Structures are given as C-alpha cells and as structure tokens.
Image: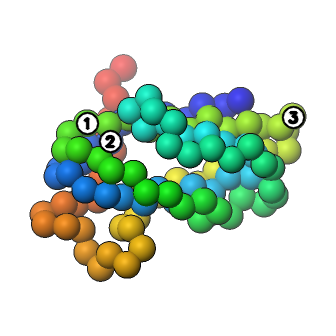
Amino acid sequence: IVYFANRFHVDAPGKWDICLGHDGGAKVFVDRKAVFADPRRINPAAPNRARFTVSLKRGLHEIVVALDTDRGMGWGIYLAFALPEGATKPPGKLRYPRVVQAKP
C-alpha cells in the first residue's frame, strides 16, 4: 500500500466533490475519517472513476489516499476537487480548496 497525503485550506464551509481515479484498490480519508473505499483493481486508472461528496468547514484539512499496489498491478492515481453535480459556481465567496505547502 502506498499513501499519498496533503493539507489544503478551505475559505468557507461548503460541499465539494472529490474525483478519484485509481487502478488499484483505494481508500480516502479526510481529517482522519474514511470517506470512500473501493477494493477493486480495474486497469487502467481513469481520472473520474469515483466521485463522492464531502462537507468541509472553513480552515485547514488533510486528505490521505491509500492505494493498494496489488503487487505492481495498481499504480495509477488521479485526484481533483470539483463542484457537486448541478452546482454552477462555488457558494458565496467559496473558492476551490488550495494546497498548503507543508514545512519540512
């Protein structure tokens, strides 16, 4: 299993879709809470294989993706934030989540 992690900041509370592409089994955690899991390996990794909604409060958050490499058969991964389906713009002054550089 390979873990990908990053911190990001949200300017205002709201709902966001996370689009995850993966070809090995994957599990996603936001702020240490599991929000998505799919154990199947399906090659190749498609950018929007999975799409799920998370509610985020204003402030700093952490996302961790656990990717099962399935003995070398799972190795592709994509991750992006998107507006929930049907939304035409972020609510209020909400901007897309932005990555926060971790200090060494």
Q: Which residue is mark 1?
A: 60
**Residue tagged by mark 3?**
71
Is mark 3 in CB contact (under 8 Å) with mark 2? no
Q: Are marks 1 and 2 in contact (CB under 8 Å)?
A: yes
Element under disc 3:
helix
Q: How many marks?
A: 3
**Pick the front one: 61 or 6:** 61
Name the side, left or right, on which 8 lies relative to 64.
left
Disc number placed over residue 34 in the picture, else none: none
Quarter placement of the N terminus: top right
User: Can you identify the residue that label 2 sits on?
Assistant: 8
Task: Kindly identify the residue that appears in the image at 32 percent across and 24 percent down.
Answer: 103
Label 1: element kind: strand
- Which of disc 3 and disc 1 is earlier in sequence? 1
- Between the C-alphas of marks 1 and 3, the distance is 34 Å
- Report the side of 34 relative to 98 (left or right): right
Label 1 CA crowd tier, 10 Å (few <14, some 14–19, many 20+): some
- Disc 1 marks which amino acid? Leu
Which secondary structure lies at badge 2?
strand
Callout 2 amino acid? Phe
Q: CA distance from mark 3 to mark 2?
A: 31 Å
Q: Quadrant of residue 4?
A: top right
